[in-house]
Amino acid sequence: MFTRGTLIFIGQRVVLIAFTVLAVSSIVFLGIHRLPGDALFNEHLHGEQYALLLHHYNLDKPLLVQYRDFMIALVTRGDLGESLVNRGVKITPLVLRELGISVEVGGFALVFTIGLGLLFGVVASVRQNTWVDYVLSTTSVIGYSMPNFVIASFLILVFGKWLEGVTGGTFYYQLGAWKGDIGQLWLPAFALGFPYASIVARLTRASMLEVIRQDYIRTARAKGLRETVIVARHALRNALIPVITILGPLAIGIITGSVVIENLFGIPGLGKEFAQSILNRDYFIVIGVFTMYAAMVGLANLVVDLLYVVIDPRIRY
Amino acid sequence: MAVAVRVDAVSEPVQASLWSDAWRRLRRNRLALAAAIYLVLLVGIAILAIFYTPYRMSATGIAPDYAPPSLAHWLGADNLGRDQLSRLMIGAQISLVVGVGTQLLVLAVGVPIGLLAGYYRGWLDQVVTFVINVFYGVPDLLVALILVFLLGPSLANIIIAIVVTRWMDMARLVRGQTLALREREFIEAARASGAKPMKMLFGHIMPNALGPIIVQATFGVPSAILFEAFLSFLGAGVQQPTPSWGSMAKDGVDAIQFAPHMVIAPAIALSLTLMAFNFLGDGLRDALDPRSKR
C-alpha cells in the first residue's frame, strides 16, 4: 500500500507544510506590527519600567531584527515566545496543551460526523423515494443551513436550561474532568459535526444510488446474498470513494468551527485561546495559535490524501 | 407516452427557450418557490428598514434590559434595552448586503479568471490551478479573521475578506465549464469566423455557462452570509451599535440562561435565510440543468 513513492510524497508534503507554517507565522507576525496601538497598552507603565518590559519582549529593536530573532527562536527551538499578558507564561507548551484538547474534541466530532452522515446517507438511499428518504433529505438541507453556533445555542437551551432537571445542566466542559468522560463531548461534537454530517449524508446517498444500480450488485443479489451484506460490503465500499473527497474540507471545517464551539461550551482548547488572545491583545499568543492552526490544517490535508490510498487502491503517489 | 409528447408540443407552439423552460420547472418546485417568496419578503423588509424601523436600532433603554417579547416590542429587548425587532431588520440589510455584495465581487473576480484559465490553458491554467489549490488548503475562516483583524472591521473589509477566501469556487467552476465548452462545434465555428478573444469568452462561452454560474452564485450567497455571521459572532464583524445576526446571536448566547428570546430570534432568522437560499439553489440547479442527477 505504501510504496517508496508514497514516502517521498509524504516527505515533500511535510516540507511544504513546514514552509506554509513559517509563511503563516511570518505574515501574522509582520501584519500584527502594522496594527495601531501598543501591545503593552493595558499596563499604564512609563519610563524605565516600560523600557525594561519592551526590552524583555525584544520590542525595542527594529521590526526586522525582531522578526529575525522570532524566526530563529521558532525554527531552532520551536519557541513562540512569552505571553504579553500573563508574564512568564511560555507560549509553546501552552498552545501544545490546548492543541491536544482541541484535537480530542475535533477528532470525536469527526468520527461522529462521518458515522452519522454515512448512516443517514445509506438509509436514505436504501429507502429511496419513501418518506424516510424525504425526511432525511430535508433534515440534511436544514442541517447544513444551520450555523454551528445556532445548533450549539439550541442544544445549550434545551439540555442546559429546559431539561436542566433531567440533565443536571452539567454538560459544560470542566477542566480536568474530560479524561474518560466522553459524555461531555457529545453536544460540542454534535454542534460541530451536524452541518458536515448533512453534507456527508447527501454525498453518500447520491453515490450509493449510483453504485446500487451497477451490475455487480445485481450479481450479488442473484447469488442470494443478504441485502445487509450487499449494502455494507459491496455497495458502501465503492460508494465511499466520492465521499472521501470532502474529508479535507470537512476536517478544515471542524478545525475552524471549533473556534466558535469551544467558546460556547467553555472548552479550554486552541479556539478559546484564540478568541481570548485577540480580546486581550496578547499578540504573541495570536501568532502562536495561528501557527498551530496552520500546522494542523496541513497535517489534516496530508492524512486525507493518504486515506485515498488506503481506501482506493487504484490511487498511488 | 408518444401521444403525451405530441399533445405537449401542440399545446406549446412557441419554441421554449432554456430560460422559459427553467422558469416552468422552477415554478413546479414548491420548496424552491416558497424559498423565493421568503427571500422576496426578506428583501422587502431590508428595504423597508432603510426608511422605517419600529424603534431606532441603536436607541438604548427604550425597554427594560432583557425584556421578553411584548406587544410594544414584538421580539423583546436586548442586553442594553434596545428593540430586537428593529435590530433584526437592520441585521437583514447587513446579511443581504454581505451575501449579494460578496457574490457580485466573486463573479467579477472568479468568472474572468476561470474563463481565461480554461480557454487559454497552458502555463496560465497551471498557475491559476495552483493558486486555487493553495487557497483551498488554508482554513478560510481563519484567513478571513486575520484579514479583518489586520484591515479593521468594517462592512467593506468583511466583504473583501470573504471574497479573498471564497473566490475559488466560482473560478474553478467556470474553468471547468470553459474547458468543456471550448471543444464544442459552435466555438470552433465562432473561431473559424474570426471572433475576437473578448467576444469569444464573454459572448460565446460565458452565456453557455450561465446556468451553472447562477446556481453557484446562489449557493455562494448563504455561505457568505454564514461567514459574516461567524465573524460577527467572534466579534470581528460589523461593529456596535450596528447589529448583525451573528453579533445578536452572540449577545443572546451570553444571556441564554435568563433571556433565551435574545438568541432565538436571530438564530431562526439566520437559519431560515440560509435554508431559503439553499432550497432556491437546489431548485435552480434542477431547473437549469435537468440532466443533473439528484
Image (cartoon, rainbow, N blue to C red):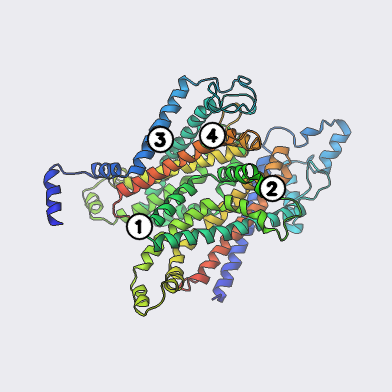
Q: Which residue is mark 2?
A: A168
Question: How far across and down, in percent of the image, does residue B129 sit?
Answer: 46, 55
Name which residue type carries label 2. Gly
The chain identifier of the residue carrying mark 2 reads A
- Is residue A317 something one can see in this rendering? no
x, y percentage for residue A303?
A: 58, 64
Where is the N terminus of chain B found, in terms of image quarters? bottom left
Between the residue at mark 1 and the residue at mark 4, the CA separation in whole angstroms equals 34 Å
Find the residue positioned furthest to the front.
A165
Q: Which residue is mark 4?
A: B265
What residue is pinned by disc 3? B39
- Mark 3 residue type: Leu
CA separation in Å, label 2 and label 4? 26 Å
Instruction: Give the distance between the C-alpha atoms of the residues marked 2 and 3, in whole angstroms.
Output: 40 Å
Circle 1 Cα neighbour tier, 10 Å, few/some/many (<14 / 14–19 / ≥20): few
Residue drawn 33% across and 57% down? B293
- Residue A283 versus residue B61: which sits nearer the camera? B61
